[in-house]
Image: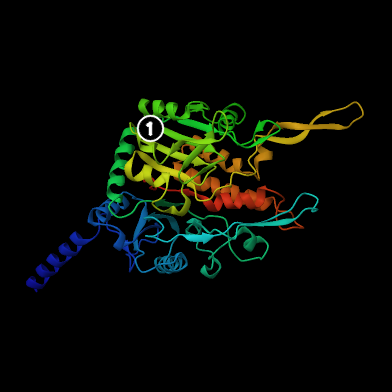
């Protein structure tokens, strides 16, 4: 009997030593910790090396308030099948979902496909039309943010399919999703840089520094001027009480380098014209030129760590290795970028709205542009933008603020449906949901 107990003790100690760092629930089972929500850490075992996997386990172990589930996606080549596997695992574990953290590019851990197809309807219903891009499919991780949807409806999703063809698909996220858009041999190094970044900013207030090249004008008014909107967030909406911000319109590349040399920053880059190759501005004498691209991202921004928010252009198109976002993550000091996978989703932004501004003696109203109020923003892209910065102002992490702003935006859009048409007129409703689908958090979730 003594020998049996001694051997059992040795076996127990050996099993404990072989557990992943922190004692994870694996994808094949978990101990009964129903009071904790499940945080899924999804990776592809054939697309990470030993250092990557060790770093993933050490990182996930720092999430102390959740039941951490390491999930190998190796056998799931399609996002719909991976979603079904995650849903089955969640059903087995029970409880709630706290979030999903993905490791790998689209080829490693598959993203969902969606297409641009939207029905536009003007206020009077006189000029309805369907806008569709039949030549290109886009990718998204959005549908990992809820388990309410049936996977059979999640191939080539479009806003048109959901609202006009009545596909039973929810477009409101339930929990945050983040993807570290790096591949084999790149992950461990980034996790180390992320750890160093956290130590560097601990107890500090990091300034938001915005670089903007507005290109969408109505009667001379720049609608896509994020610098203007940032100033209004402080002046008219009472934000930025505890955080400094600075804005630039000129000499963007040079000033970006200057700011990066001076210290850590939350970088915000805005333009309505850009691709996965970089952000463009109008060039003197005509034409366009990049001011931040794959060629200079790691030479301009090479002094200090910085978070990034790329607004208005498809900087993360494809969620693969071929983009300015991947280059900044893999070879530079970029931390946790927020980026879009599709071009053109900046339509419908509004710094100004066409509205009555003056009444004549005869009682008629004269219309012209005025600055958008909070109510004007509620079905427009800047509504997300506002709530993202409002969340940061309340002390939320960037990922939590990002997620909550998406929920708020989706909820508000649903309130603005036209009861006759089923959705709102051009361009806010469909573009709004494309913003929700295409915006991604492409780094690591923040542990507390």
Image position, residue 102 (x, y; %): 39, 55
Q: Residue at x 37, y 44 (%)?
A: 327
As drawn, the residue found furthest toward the front would be 285
Q: Nearer the viewer, residue 200 or 426?
A: 426
Can residue 448 be seen by looking at this rendering?
no
Question: Can you say whether 328 is above or below 89 in the image?
Answer: above
Question: Can you say whether 39 is above or below 306 in the image?
Answer: below
Q: Residue at x 40, y 69 (%)?
A: 92
Q: Residue at x 40, y 67 (%)?
A: 77
Q: Nearer the viewer, residue 342 or 335?
A: 342
Can residue 332 be seen by looking at this rendering?
yes
Q: Residue at x 34, y 33 (%)?
A: 302
Q: Nearer the viewer, residue 397 or 230?
A: 230
> In the image, is 282 to the left or to the right of 253?
right
**Residue annotated with mark 1:** 300
> In the image, is 407 to the left or to the right of 58?
right
> In the image, is 390 to the left or to the right of 19?
right
Here the colouring is rainbow
As drawn, the residue found furthest toward the right would be 362
Image position, residue 360 (x, y; %): 88, 27
Q: Quadrant of the C terminus?
A: top left
Image position, residue 285 (x, y; %): 57, 29
> In the image, is 324 to the left or to the right of 375?
left
Question: Can you say whether 334 is above or below 426 in the image?
Answer: above
């Amino acid at each position: 009997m003594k020998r049996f107990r001694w051997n059992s003790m040795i076996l127990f100690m050996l099993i404990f030593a072989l557990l992943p760092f922190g004692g994870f629930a694996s994808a094949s089972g978990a101990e009964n910790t129903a009071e904790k929500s499940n945080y899924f850490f999804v990776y592809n075992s054939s697309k990470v090396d030993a250092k990557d996997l060790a770093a993933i386990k050490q990182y996930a172990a720092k999430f102390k308030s959740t039941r951490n589930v390491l999930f190998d996606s190796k056998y799931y080549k399609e996002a719909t099948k991976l979603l079904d596997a995650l849903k089955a695992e969640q059903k087995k574990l029970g409880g709630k979902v706290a979030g999903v953290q993905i490791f790998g590019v689209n080829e490693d851990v598959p993203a969902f496909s969606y297409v641009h197809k939207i029905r536009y309807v003007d206020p009077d219903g006189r000029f309805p039309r369907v806008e569709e891009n039949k030549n290109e499919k886009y990718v998204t991780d959005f549908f990992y943010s809820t388990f309410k949807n049936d996977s059979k409806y999640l191939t080539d999703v479009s806003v048109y399919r959901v609202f006009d063809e009545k596909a039973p698909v929810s477009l409101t996220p339930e929990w945050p999703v983040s993807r570290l858009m790096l591949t084999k041999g790149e992950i461990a190094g980034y996790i180390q840089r992320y750890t160093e970044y956290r130590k560097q900013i601990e107890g500090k207030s990091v300034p938001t520094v915005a670089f903007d090249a507005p290109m969408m004008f109505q009667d001379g008014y720049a609608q896509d001027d994020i610098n203007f909107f940032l100033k209004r967030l402080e002046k008219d909406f009472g934000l930025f009480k505890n955080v400094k911000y600075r804005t630039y319109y000129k000499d963007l590349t040079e000033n970006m380098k200057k700011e990066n040399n001076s210290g850590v920053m939350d970088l915000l880059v805005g333009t309505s014209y850009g691709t996965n190759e970089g952000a463009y501005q109008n060039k003197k004498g005509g034409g366009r030129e990049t001011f931040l691209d794959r060629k200079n991202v790691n030479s301009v921004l090479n002094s200090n760590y910085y978070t990034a928010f790329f607004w208005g252009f498809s900087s993360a198109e494809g969620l693969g290795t071929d983009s300015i976002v991947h280059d900044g993550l893999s070879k530079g000091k970029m931390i946790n970028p927020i980026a879009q996978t599709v071009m053109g989703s900046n339509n419908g932004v509004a710094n100004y709205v066409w509205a009555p501004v003056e009444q004549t003696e005869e009682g008629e109203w004269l219309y012209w542009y005025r600055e958008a109020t909070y109510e004007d923003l509620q079905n427009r892209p800047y509504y997300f933008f506002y709530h993202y910065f409002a969340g940061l102002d309340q002390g939320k992490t960037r990922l939590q603020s990002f997620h909550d702003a998406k929920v708020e935006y989706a909820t508000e859009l649903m309130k603005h449906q036209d009861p006759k048409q089923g959705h709102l007129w051009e361009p806010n409703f469909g573009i709004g949901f494309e913003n929700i689908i295409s915006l991604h958090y492409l780094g690591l979730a923040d542990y507390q």
